[in-house]
Image (cartoon, helix red, strand yellow):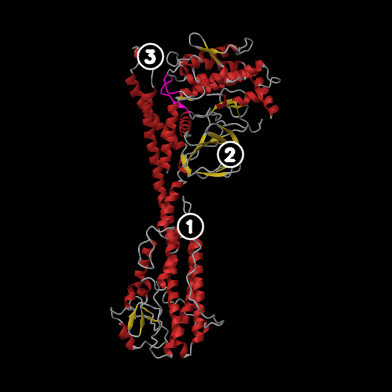
Amino acid sequence: MKADNVIVFPDGLAGEGSVGGADVVLIDYERAKELQRLDYQLKGNAAGDEALMCRRMGQDKSWGVDSDLHGLCTVAFVLLFGKDEKEMVEANADGTSRLNRVYTIRRYWTSSGLLTSLFGTFLNFDPIEDDYDDVVVVLRDKFDAYVRENNNEVEEALTAFRSALSNKS
Amino acid sequence: MGFPALESALIGPAAGPPVPDPGAALLPPPAAEEDELDEQGNDDGFHLDHEQPPPPLPANLPPAPAAAEEDELGDQGNDDPFNQEDEQPPPPLPANLPPLPAAEEDEFGGQDNNDPFNQDDEQPDELDEEIEEDEGGGDQGEGGAVPPNATNDDNNNACMIMERQAVGEGSMPARKFRIHEGGDSRSSNRNGGLILQRSDGGQGSSFSGLDSPNMPSGLNNQFRAHDMQQMGRDIGKEGRDNASRRRRHASNRSDSVPGIGLDTSSTILSLTKTFDDQLSKIQSELDSIRQTISMLQGNPNNLERIIELESEVSELILTRVNIEMLADKAIKSLSDIRKTATDLQPKLFELRKERIAIEERMVEQRAESAEGGLVLDIPGREEGTGQSSAADDYGLTHQQSIASTAEFVKAMSKVPSIIVERILPDLSNGKTLDLGGKEVTILRQLGSGTNAKVFLCSVLSDDGQSEECALKVQSTGESLVLEYRYLSLLLLRIEPDESGFLPFPRLMGHYMFNGGDSMLLMNYEPGCLTALQAVNYALNNTKLIDGTTRAVLATYFTARLLTHTVKLHKNRILVSVQVISELHLSTILTIFYFSIAM
């Protein structure tokens, strides 16, 4: 999962919970994998871009859904800062990962808490020790709640987004 | 609002057309069958070359006089005694003709089985068998053989071979026509003193076309002249009738062979034309000889020349008969090929089902090997935390993998995989492909990666409507087989919401090429763009989008992405896997597919 493989629809057909007909679709399942369970652990010789590897994959440990969660963070990072995903992560002394300090989540952003939680938890998600529902599903619900509670703000942002695209074209 | 087309991989949401009928995917025949059928066609020994050389014609013939004697001879209809095509009984001899001398009947047997003429009763069948052997490429002895492994050029010369037989190089003419000089039975019809006789069905309707030169001339000679002229006229009429019949025959088979690249209509028509051309030349030569004979008639000094010309006429008649039979056999053979191709369709259907079953087993084995090779590091279980053991886990996942395999097979039947061509043609703008009956026109390239390209294309649906789709093309080595699998599973597991939205591309078809390439046809929504393009085209436009607005947009799209990701995970699909072993499996599956396709 990376920014190249996420298709953005500024308007049109969109799923439930969307605002203003804008939504995203995930493409490229060429290297997908079928899971037996959400805590299912996989291991193999990792290939591809190192920046897209989750923490455990980089440490040559088994991995699972944390790979997708890491990819999701890269998409959010690209959208948020417009920078290459390779600059997203830096390692803590204890081996955990964190958002590169060069890129700051501003406190005045209405979603600053959500975004901080996103990078803080997903970059270090452990599919065995962390419960998927307690971490991932809960955070998803928080994001959905944010969208509902800030519907007007989202609508205005989407309008600006479409205007920018129109100017570009 | 609409957005211009963007140069990247753009795959639309779930607003695509309905999933094609699985059964429809089984209609198009694989390219592999073409070869099989082509080979069958060649094995028939018949040659569909349209440029056969004309048969050799008698040389040194005098120019034909302008006048013909048709009025004098009268129209006898289909009286040609050599015409066996309609299996009509031969016509009786003209009533005003003198009976054959009794001595001659006695001499040549009359009703006796030893009579070489009465043996002609069986000769049509023998001739058929001989031709069939030729078709099969069997050895026919000198002059008449088509080797079993005959090449196309060899087969092309079938007519020529038959013609050589007709002029005495093979054994067939001698079997069909017994030629006598005086009282001696001879197998050659080259020299003078000919009696050309044929009996049909033992009804005593023997035809004595020529008499012995030793016989008194006069009536006999007159009979010869009349007979040969009648024969030539009949041949002309019959030739026209037969040509017309063959054309009707060809037009009745105007459709092409289903599933193979053999157009029986055009082939039969070309073949008919070739044969008709040959026969037309023979007819023209016969007319010329006939008129020459009429000019030479009445002068006893010309007797030898007349006999020679009559001999030539007999050869040409025989050649004509052989060509006629060969033409019928060839057309019948083409018809048989078409029937064979039609009969193969159910077998093809069964083979496809077998392929799916084999794939099911492959996937199952793959799941088992993945269990053994990829499941590692289960610390909780090793530490005795009460969870299931690794062995129990393996058993459970094995059952799950079987269930998943069955689900996969079901998913495959929902979006079928089709073998469409032997080799992927060059793809460029404006190029039109026939993908399993779908007419797909490449509009432009949307994006490309290391091994894949994505094209925007126009697909003509069954109801004549055109819609835009994304066509992902992948080269050998890293096929789209796995993507096809996971998209099929997703299509089976995740139902569209009320608005018809799906968080993944709607798969419309998977097409494989024997060259190793494969294609995925997916829906496409105009105006879409990748997240990366969204950043480049809009989010980095700081005049319209400030930092706060950008954060809202990023949060919103992240929320949507997280929602879809959780949905995928809950349906047991992991999107991001970058494992070399997965690539190997992909390659193995690709090889497997194409080995089935070959």
- Magenta-colored span: A31-45
Q: Which residue is mark 1?
A: B264
Residue B14 x, y percent position in the rendering: 55, 31
Chain name for mark 1: B
Is residue B465 rendered to the left or right of residue B186?
A: right
Q: Nearer the viewer, residue A4 or A152?
A: A4
Please tell me in which quadrant of the rendered image residue B6 appears. top right
Residue type, numbered disc 2: Cys
Q: Are marks 2 and 3 on the same chain?
A: yes
Q: Which residue is mark 2?
A: B457
Neighbours of disc 1 within 10 Å: few (<14), some (14-19), many (20+): many
Q: Secondary structure at mark 2?
A: strand
Q: Which residue is mark 3?
A: B379
Residue type, numbered disc 1: Thr
| Alpha carbons under labels 1 and 2: distance apart | 32 Å
In the displayed structure, would residue B417 be above or below residue A30? below
